[in-house]
């Protein structure tokens, strides 16, 4: 666990540094869990799409994160497009 409670004004550079720390830890067979993360840092990590990579733990040690409840659809990226749209046609070969 890494105590990040002293980070009062996080930014994208902060998230980048933490992601690099996680990468280094994983190369050594370890895992970083953010302890004492303020809401703004958690929000930035989620906006960067790194919530699974940089899990946060509450003061009780329980990992913070919201799972979809029973009967609730999990949020994610939906794949949809108009086949007549030239941009969609150009990207179809990337699937």
Image (spheres, rainbow, N blue to C red):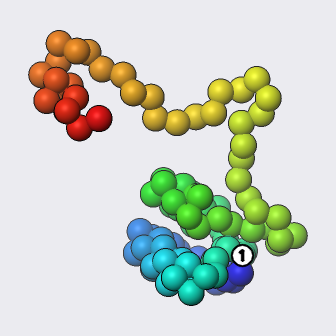
> Who's the residue at 56% across and 78% down the image?
26
Disc 1 packing (10 Å; few <14; some 14–19; many ≥20): many
- The quadrant of the rendering that contains the C terminus is top left
Q: Is residue 40 visible?
A: no
Q: Is residue 80 above or below residue 51?
A: above
> In the shown orientation, is residue 86 left or right of residue 60?
left
Where is residue 25? Give x, y as percent: 56, 83
- The quadrant of the rendering that contains the N terminus is bottom right
> Who's the residue at 64% across and 77% down the image?
31
> In the shown orientation, is residue 17 left or right of residue 36?
left
> Who's the residue at 51% across and 60% down the image?
50
Q: Which structural element holds mark 1?
A: strand
Where is residue 19? Give x, y as percent: 48, 73
- The one nearer the camera, 67 or 31, is 31
- Where is residue 12, by image quadrant? bottom left
Where is residue 94? Give x, y as percent: 23, 38
> In the shown orientation, is residue 84 left or right of residue 51?
left
- The one nearer the camera, 17 or 43, is 17
Q: Is residue 12 visible?
A: yes
- The one nearer the camera, 19 or 25, is 25
> In the shown orientation, is residue 49 left or right of residue 56?
left
Residue corresponding to mark 1: 35
């Amino acid at each position: 666990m890494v105590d990040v409670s002293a980070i009062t004004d996080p930014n994208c550079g902060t998230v980048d540094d933490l992601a690099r720390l996680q990468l280094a830890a994983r190369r050594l067979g370890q895992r970083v869990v953010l302890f004492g993360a303020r809401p703004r840092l958690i929000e930035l990590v989620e906006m960067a799409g790194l919530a699974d990579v940089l899990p946060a733990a509450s003061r009780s040690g329980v990992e913070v994160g919201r799972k979809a409840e029973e009967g609730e659809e999990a949020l994610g990226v939906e794949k949809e497009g108009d086949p007549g749209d030239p941009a969609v046609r150009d990207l179809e070969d990337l699937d």
